[in-house]
Amino acid sequence: MDLRDLELFCEVASLRSFSRAAKAIGVSQPVASETVKAIEKHLGLELINREKRPLELTPSGQTYYTGCRELLESYRRLEDRVLQVRDQVTGPVRVAAIYSVGLLQMDCYVKQFEHLYPDAALELRYLHPDAVLERVVNDEADLGLISFPPRRADLTCIPWQEQEMVVVVSPQHRLAARKSMVAAELDGESLVTFTHELQIRAEMDRWLRQAKVSVDVVHEFDNIETIKRAVEIGCGIALLPISSVRREMEIGSLRMLKLDDVRWIRPLGIIHKRHNSPTTAVQRFLELLHEPPESFFRPKATPPAAKKSPSAAAAVANT
């Protein structure tokens, strides 16, 4: 059985979908389906219950999935040890990040990593916080980038960033002309905020209680992008990390006010399985995340070709 086939099976089992797994691996859906069927025929067992939606692993499938993950992880580490002899950084780096980690910032890290280590294969997926945690715990991601990282015995958390929370309003809001405010002025405001299952919502509710502020929650969403869109059309104000609204500030679709009397911070952490030793490639990306993006390599822009005058063009043609 080819390791690539086992990797494809693990992707189907993880995503619970042939089409999504095929897209993630870079094959067609029929290839993904036929690969899993071939494995099942080889074993003489049904591994996936195709009658359920989303797909579900059978008991035998769960056992096989766990074993395949361990086998693939062992192979990656063996390959890494061999390549270290040649000081070569190669192999996969699987990163799961919450949507609001900062797309522009992460793009800088991805491009710098690819520039420094072209033989490595960085895979970055943006997911719901629960899905980020699940992928790290299940060994489906080497690193997870998450806010308010949980304290768990099976995880190691490395502090990464502290993002200041600011008040965000539409350009038409009565507060839009101001640069700052105090927390008490939030009292009675219509608030567009996060859903209750997210840790950031619990922290925000605690901050507001401590400031003795009561707000009118008008909308709840599970991601920052939707919150920003709701604020842009005047549904209310929001409390968001300053880094998540920089683009909207630049184009003028949102306004930002700092809080003068409180310092509300959203911590971002990097999580990984406690007893998993990172490969060289994963360790290099981990180190890179602690570097300032402004220090990264920037390829020089190629200057536009000078336009030749008719006489110069003729001279060149005659040489």
Image (cartoon, rainbow, N blue to C red):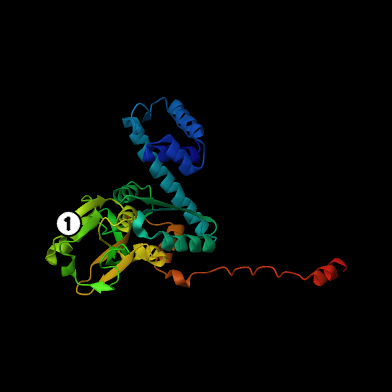
Farthest residue toward the right? Answer: 318
To which quarter of the image does residue 228 belong? bottom left
Q: Residues within 10 Å of mark 1 (few under 14, many from 20)?
A: few
Q: Secondary structure under badge 1? A: strand
Q: What x and y, as percent, mark residue 38?
A: 48, 29
Name the residue rendered at 31%, 31% in the picture. Answer: 59
Farthest residue toward the left? Answer: 212
Pick the front one: 9 or 245: 245
Residue under label 1 = 216
To which quarter of the image does residue 51 belong? top left
In the displayed structure image, the side of residue 215 where residue 289 appears, left or right: right
Q: Quadrant of the C terminus?
A: bottom right
Pick the front one: 216 or 165: 216
Work out whether residue 161 can be spotted. no
In the displayed structure image, the side of residue 80 where residue 54 appears, left or right: left
Image label count: 1
Name the residue rendered at 47%, 56% in the picture. Answer: 81
Work out whether residue 120 can be spotted. yes
Pick the front one: 129 or 279: 129
The amino acid type found where label 1 is placed reads Asp
**Where 260 sits versus 35, above or below?**
below
Q: What x and y, as percent, mark residue 163?
A: 30, 66
Q: What x and y, as percent, mark residue 208?
A: 16, 63
Q: What x and y, as percent, mark residue 185?
A: 18, 68
